[in-house]
Amino acid sequence: MDQPASSHGILMQPSTDGSSSLPSLHEEGMALLRQTLDRELIRHCEEAADRFYQKTKSQRPEVIQQSLPTGQKYVPTASSFTLEAVFEPEDCRRILRAIATSPARHVIERALAGPPMCDLDQAWVRRQYAPGRYPPLHAPHAWHQDGALHHDFKAEASTVPDENGLLPMLTCWLPLVPCGDDAPGLEFVAVPIDNLLPPNALPDQSLRATHASEKFWKPLMQPGDVVLFRSGVIHRTHVTPAMQSDRTSIELRFVAANQVPPRLAHDRFIPLD
């Protein structure tokens, strides 16, 4: 079950008109906006994604990759595809338009301190399977920070990463099905972290020895919800042996238009208009 939001102060119910008390990220660097996106759009996306996964489920990873449009990617260890590999161009635009016209936009703009752009090369559709249903190579995500993207830990001269290694980025996570109970969800460490952590700080045992149990947050989420979190937030896939259903989600990553990190300089970006 998800822990009471009041224990972390990270649950937000957007105002009905989206104008008063505009939301912003809480001090932990994350926020959950309930029922923010149109359910019909989310249902359409879930059905389209399900057809795509059904079409590819019996194919070998190399065959799947070869079948994708030029520039699109498949990650078999995460059962993830880039957004444009799964959805038609108009559906991709509808997803971004839904974010742009929702209270989530104000959170993103405030967090990035400027007009946001979506990184299309880091926009993903992912399916997390229930235990016992994993396809070959698939595994849940372990504890990590999204801001470590493309960081070369092996090149570090010491075990402490460069303090500038954390990307100035915001993740927008959209569940397409109910998750966190019968289907895998997300688990967060609800503490503010503004620096890139070395891999040896992220094993589950180390984190639980460092942070109080009430700081571990596993929200129950529904289609239409939006989770936003800064690049330093520690999180992982929440999955238990009792879960019976699969979860499909969309992951978008935003940067400020005037602050594209060098590590992402070769990616394709689209303004959140």
Image (cartoon, helix red, strand yellow):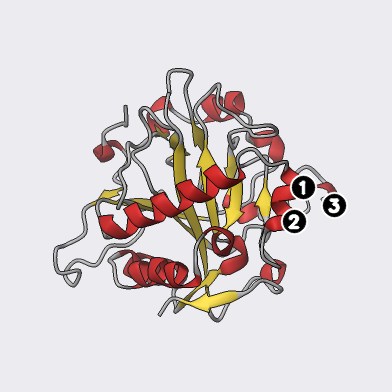
- Give, as a three-letter code, the residue at label 2: Gln
- Give, as a three-letter code, the residue at label 3: Ala
Give the residue displayed 37% in from the left and 29% down from the top.
214
Q: Callout 3: few (<14), some (14-19), or many (20+) C-alpha neighbours within 10 Å?
A: few
Q: Is residue 161 left or right of residue 255?
A: right
In-front residue for pair 247/20: 247
Specify the farthest residue to the top.
Answer: 242
| Image-quadrant location for residue 3 | top left
Q: Circle 3 is placed at which residue position?
A: 155
The CA span between labels 1 and 2 is 6 Å
Compared with 169, 35 (above or below) is above
Q: Quadrant of the N terminus?
A: top left
Q: Position of residue 94 (x, y in %)?
A: 38, 70
The CA span between labels 3 and 1 is 29 Å
Q: Circle 2 is placed at which residue position?
A: 66
Q: Position of residue 33 (x, y in %)?
A: 29, 53
- Give, as a three-letter code, the residue at label 1: Glu
Q: Circle 1 is placed at which residue position?
A: 62
Number of residue marks: 3
